Image (cartoon, rainbow, N blue to C red):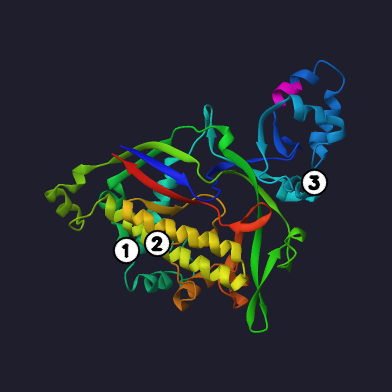
Amino acid sequence: MRYRLTTLTPTLVGDGRRLSPIDYMVWKDHVNVLDQWRIFRLLAKGPRLEGYLTQLKKADKLDFASWGGFAQNFAGRRIPFENAAYAGYWNRAAGDSLQIPTFSAGASGPYLPGASIKGALRTGMVFSNWRDGMLQDVAARVKGERVPRRPAESIEDQALGSAGANKMRLIGAGDSATVDNSKFKVYLLRTSTLQPRGGNFALGWKQSPRGAVDGNRPEESTPSFAEMAAPGTVFEGDWNEKSFFLQPEVRRAVRWPDGFSRAKIFESVNIYASGLLSLQRQYASWAGLGLLDQSLEQLEQRLAAARENGSCLLCLGWGGGLTTKSAWLDTGNSDYRQILQAYTIYNRALATNLPFPKTRRIVFLNNRPATLPGWAELSVVE
């Protein structure tokens, strides 16, 4: 069997690597990734190597006036910006916003790791198998003197089964085949935030290291850039189902419910996707992001079609934030907030009494805040 994953919004599933601003140059609305080894070999033949190494060591960006020829002649890859206006934003940016996370790639080219699919499916399964009292159990675990690093680990075992009885053992997804580099673009993202105003909420755009600008001035906020697969990109790979577990005697031994199958997993994931999209549409309404709300409405329509044809919608990869990685969506729940308060990283955000989390990474399309990253449709071909 084979799986087919089609990206619905710009998607980045990376391996932790980033392009430093001294590893590329922006030229003709493209990010030109430099082949540094070729450049070193060329400069080693003359007197310019020392000057180039000095600039690599000290500069935030390579000086285009001095080294721009490398962008034309020594680029291993040329990744276009999604919109020509982004080159201007890049020129004015500084610091971490110049670090461009890249899509996972091997020697043969970019590919989708199978683990990213399995992780997104697992989140949906935990969500749909959540039972009364589980959240309270997690809250009790964080009240001790030492807060556990993984307070919900045993709860996941209750939801999915532990060790050999884990329901996710039924399925397996391999790494996809490589896709062409032409499927990728460098997208602009900005971080939106909610600000209190007159008893309601107003849109703001985050600045680095802190603060925010008014919602109608996104160009003054801190941008970020990422290499992402464009909507419509298709990844295909091997899909495995261990039918051994579905034999009646084995099913009883591992205590799996009757009728458990891939269809049940996909339906669980679709239930989670429905709840997540509703949560994101509520955020779009609070922030007054009409174009984003239209994008989410289209995803809801795609979800309805997916449920009819036996596929599922996933949100995976970079940029989704805590909301898309958590199997609990009711962020206003008092027990949930009590759990978060045990971890100091969330204290400042919770103290504002604003909806949590109050920020989202928004992908800009044609220089307008348009969609959220990482949504895709997964289907299996037998």
Question: Left or right: where does residue 149 sit relative to residue 57?
Answer: left
The alpha-carbon separation of the residues under discs 3 and 2 comes to: 40 Å
Report the residue at 46% width, 40% height from top.
234
Q: Amino acid at mark 1?
A: Asn
Report if residue 357 is visible in the image. no
Front residue of 155/101: it is 101
Report the residue at 19% width, 55% height from top.
259
Quarter of the rendering occupied by the C terminus: top left
Closer to the chain start, of discs 1 and 3, is 3
> Magenta segment, which residues?
35-40
The residue labelled by disc 2 is 272
Give the SS element for disc 1: loop
The residue labelled by disc 1 is 129
Q: Count the labels in the image.
A: 3
Give the SS element for disc 2: helix
Residue extending farthest left: 249
The residue labelled by disc 3 is 91
The alpha-carbon separation of the residues under discs 2 and 1 comes to: 10 Å
Question: Left or right: where does residue 32 sit relative to residue 64?
Answer: left
> Is-magenta flag for residue 23?
no
Q: Residues within 10 Å of mark 3 (few under 14, many from 20)?
A: few
- Residue 39 image position (x, y, % from top left): 75, 23
Question: Left or right: where does residue 205 sit relative to residue 11?
Answer: right
Closer to the chain start, of discs 3 and 2, is 3
Quarter of the rendering occupied by the N terminus: top left
The alpha-carbon separation of the residues under discs 1 and 3 comes to: 48 Å
Q: Main secondary structure of the magenta part?
A: helix
